[in-house]
Image (tube, rainbow, N blue to C red):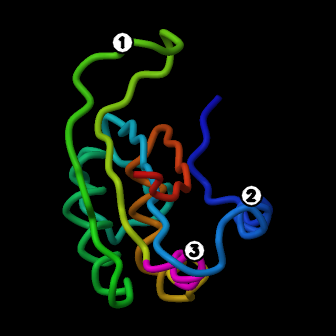
Amino acid sequence: MRTIEIDAASVAEASGLLPSDGPVFILNLLRYREQADYGDRTDAAPCSGREAFHERYVPVFNQIAEAGVRPVWIGAALARLVGPADELWDDVAIVEYPSFAAFRRVVDSEKYRTEAAPHRLAALEDCRLIAMTKLL
């Protein structure tokens, strides 16, 4: 099942499960479209989904993100060892936020919705976002 939207109901539910303070790590499993899909928009030059994500989305996200938001790890997903055969990912990223509230402030902001999210949605064929806390 293709899922790329950040669902407000899931974010609200997660708010009740995660600690109110302290760092939260968001695991991003990313599958890109072969060609970015901007729909009717004519202001975006054609590019691959990977290019739309890394060259358009990430720079805007970095401008919007508040202090303390940082990528911890980004890498290519090379081989599935365990998992459904139809769940293949191109890249995996872990982003640290000072708190889950900080994540919410970024993705709920008008600037994110208008300037960053269109590139993310155009770039991705499918994704998973999993909020985590550090155990060790």
Amino acid type of the residue tagged 3 in the rendering: Phe
Q: Which residue is mark 1?
A: 81
* 92 relative to 82 in the view: left or right: left
Are there few (<14), some (14-19), or many (20+) residues within 10 Å of tag 1?
few
Q: Is residue 65 above or below residue 45?
A: below
Front disc: 2 or 3: 3
Question: In the image shown, does 45 or 18 lie closer to the viewer?
Answer: 18
Which stretch did the figure color magenta? 98-105
SS state under label 1: loop
At 35% from the left edge and 75% from the top edge, which residue is drawn? 61
SS state under label 2: helix
Q: Which residue is mark 2?
A: 10
Q: Are marks 3 and 1 in contact (CB under 8 Å)?
A: no
Q: Which residue is mark 3?
A: 100
At 33% from the left edge and 90% from the top edge, which residue is drawn? 67
Task: Give percent across and percent down for residue 26.
Answer: 46, 57
Q: Upstream in the sequence, badge 2 or badge 1?
A: 2
Q: CA distance from mark 3 to mark 1?
A: 30 Å
Q: Are marks 2 and 3 in contact (CB under 8 Å)?
A: no
Q: CA distance from mark 2 to mark 1?
A: 28 Å
